[in-house]
Image: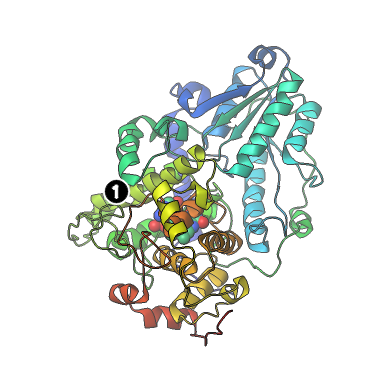
Amino acid sequence: MTPSPVKKAKTEDENSSLANQFAERRESAGENVEKFGKFNMKRVKFLTGNEGFLHREAKGVAYYMHRDQRLQDNWAALFAQKLALADNLPLYVIAGISVSHPDHAEATRRTLDFSLGGLEEVAKECAKLNIEFHLLQDMTKPMAERVLDFVKESKVGCVVTDFSPLRAHRERTEDLKEKMAKLDGPCLYQVDAHNVIPVWETSDKQEYAARTIRNKIMGKLGEFLTEFPPVVKHPVDTTYPCKAIDWDLVKKEQKVDESVKSVEWAQPGTVHGYEMLASFVTNRIKIYNKKRNDPNVKALSNLSPWFHFGQLSVQRSVLHVKRSAGTVEAKGIAEQPEDEDSEDEEDEEEEPTPKQPKSPAEAVKAFVEESVVRSELSDNYCYYNEKHGKIEGASDWAVKTLNDHKKDKREWLYTRDEFDEAKTHDELWNSAQIQLTTEAKMHGFMRMYWCKKILEWTESPEQALEFALYFNDHYSLDGADSNGIVGCMWSIAGLHDQGWAERPIFGKIRYMNYAGCKKKFDIAEYSARYGGKAYPYTKKE
Ligand SMILES: Cc1cc2nc3c(=O)[nH]c(=O)nc-3n(C[C@H](O)[C@H](O)[C@H](O)COP(=O)(O)OP(=O)(O)OC[C@H]3O[C@@H](n4cnc5c(N)ncnc54)[C@H](O)[C@@H]3O)c2cc1C
C-alpha cells in the first residue's frame, strides 16, 4: 500500500452531504437544462452535419465522453440533453479506451483503473437517469471508427463531444468530423466542458504568460463562472439498449504496464473527487497560500487526478471553494503577509513563490489563480501552438539559448533507466522521483526542481523534455495533460517565463538548485520520507 498524501478526512455521510448540497444548487439553477434558459452557446462549436436532419430523422442524441468523465456539472452532457429534450429523443453516453502499452506512456494499470473506475461510476449514474451508456470496446478499431459505427447502428442524429487541446484528441475529433461529414446528415458538436471559460473565448491567440491572460480570464469569469443546472432523469426511453458491461473483465483486458500500480489515496470517480475537495476545504485551504510551496506540508488540494480525468469539474470546485470562504474566515485563520511576487515578477532567479494573500477570501484567489488562470493558460498554449510538447514549440529566445548551450559540458549524465530507478547522485532528486513513482503525484514545488535537473543531467534539451514528459505521463495520475506539457516546457524551455542571467547548459532558462531548496524547506525531512539515497556517479563517455 502506498503512503497517503492526505489523510481520509471525510466520512461517507459528510461526502454524500456535499453531493446533496451540489444537487440542491443545481436544482436551484433550473429544473433541467431546457428550463435553465441561460445556456451559454459560446461554449459550443458546430463541427459538421445537417441540423435539419437532427430535427427530422434522428433517433437519438449521443454524448461522446472523452476528456470529462462525469455526468453532472458537465456542459457537454447538458448540451446533449438539451438537444435530446428539444426533439424528444433518447440520450446516450458513449466512451472508450484508446491507449495501450507500450505505445502510450500513460497506459499503466494505475491510470487505466482510475479512468475505467470513473467511467463505471458514470455508467451507474446513467442507468439511474434513463440514459444508455455504451462502452465502445473494440480496440482493433480507431476510436473515430467506433463512434461512427455507433452512429450508424443507433441512428443518432447528433454527437456532442468534449474538448481537449492535445494533439491526439484533436486528431481523433478531426477524424470523426471527416467521417461524419461523409454521412451527410448527423451533426457533430464540440463543447469545452473542462475550462471555466472556453479556450476559444478567453483569447484568440497564444498568450505570453500568466500576466497577459489573467485579466482576460478575470474579465469573463462573471459570464462563465455560473451554477450548473442538473442533468435529469431522461424522459425518453432508448431504442438502442446497451450491453451489460463486465467492468472487471474490461479492466483485465487492457494492455497496460502492470508494474505501475494503483494507489490507495486516489480512488476514481466523482464521489471520491468530492471527498478530496471536502478535505481540502476543511483542512488545507487555510494554509494553501503560505505553505503550498513546502513539500513537507500537506497544503495542496490534491485534486489534480480528478481534474485531469474530468471526474471533478474545476468550475464546481471553484464555486464551492468561493462559497466556503466565509466558513473558513469564521474559523479564524491568521492573516498572512502580503507579498507581491509571482512567477512572472520574480526579481531574483530562484524558484517561484506564490502570492501570499492576506485574508482567507484572498486565499480563494490563490486557488482560482492555479486552477483557472494557470490551468487555462496551459490549454491556451496547447490550443494555439501545434508544436506543444516539443522544444521548437518554445519562444525563439528560449530555443536559441538552449541551442547556444547544447554542446556545453555536462558534469552528470544519466540514462533513462538511472533516472527511472532514482539512482542519481542527488538524494533530493531521487526522493522526488520516488514520490512520483510510488504516490502517483509529485509535490508541485518538487516538480520544478526535478524537471530542471533533468535538463542539467541529460545530453540535450530534446532528450530532457522527452524523459520528463515520459516519467510525468507514465507515473503521475494527472499526467498526459496540457498542465504537464506546460510544466515541463516551463522548466526546460522557459515557456511563459522570461530570460535570466546566462549560465552553462541552461543558457537564459531559469535555474534552480539544491541550495535554493535548502533555504525553502527541510530537505532532510523530505528525503527521509521517501528514502532517496545519493548514488555514486559512474562517468559516461
Ligand atoms: C514539471 C512539471 C510537471 C507538471 N505536470 C503536471 C501534470 O502532468 N498535470 C497537472 O495537472 N499539472 C502538472 N503540473 C502543474 C502543477 O504542478 C500541478 O497541477 C499541481 O502540482 C497538482 O497538484 P494539486 O492539484 O494538489 O495542486 P493545487 O496547487 O492544489 O492546484 C489546483 C489545480 O490547479 C491547477 N494547477 C496548479 N498549479 C498549476 C500550474 N503550475 N500550471 C497549471 N495548472 C496548475 C491544477 O489543475 C491543479 O490540480 C506540472 C508542473 C511542473 C513544473
Q: Of the residues shown, which amino acid type is indicated by label 1?
A: Lys
Residue 515 lies left or right of residue 506; in this view the side is left
Residue drawn at the location 70% of the way across and 64% of the way down: 257
Is residue 14 visible to the viewer in this orientation of the structure? Answer: no
Residue 79 versus residue 235: which sits nearer the camera?
Answer: 79
Q: What is the secondary structure assignment of the residue under circle 1?
A: helix
Query: Which of these two is toward me, 448 or 82?
Result: 448
Up the image or down, 45 lies above or below 134; here it is above
Q: Which residue is depicted at the point 48% across and 79% down?
A: 530
Quarter of the picture holding the N terminus: bottom right
- Quadrant field for ligand 1: bottom left
Residue at figure coordinates x 71%, y 56% from the top left: 103
Tell me where residue 67 sits by quadrant: top right
Q: Is residue 263 above or below residue 540?
A: above
| Residue 207 seen in this snapshot | yes
The percent position of residue 448, horizontal first and vertical second, equals: 42, 63
Q: Nearer the viewer, residue 454 or 435?
A: 454
Q: Which residue is mark 1?
A: 365
Q: How far across and how far down the image is residue 444, in percent?
A: 42, 62
How busy is the neighbourhood of tag 1: few (under 14 within 10 Å), some, or many (20 plus)?
some
Left or right? Give the position of 413 relative to 258: left
Looking at the picture, does residue 183 appear above or below residue 360? above
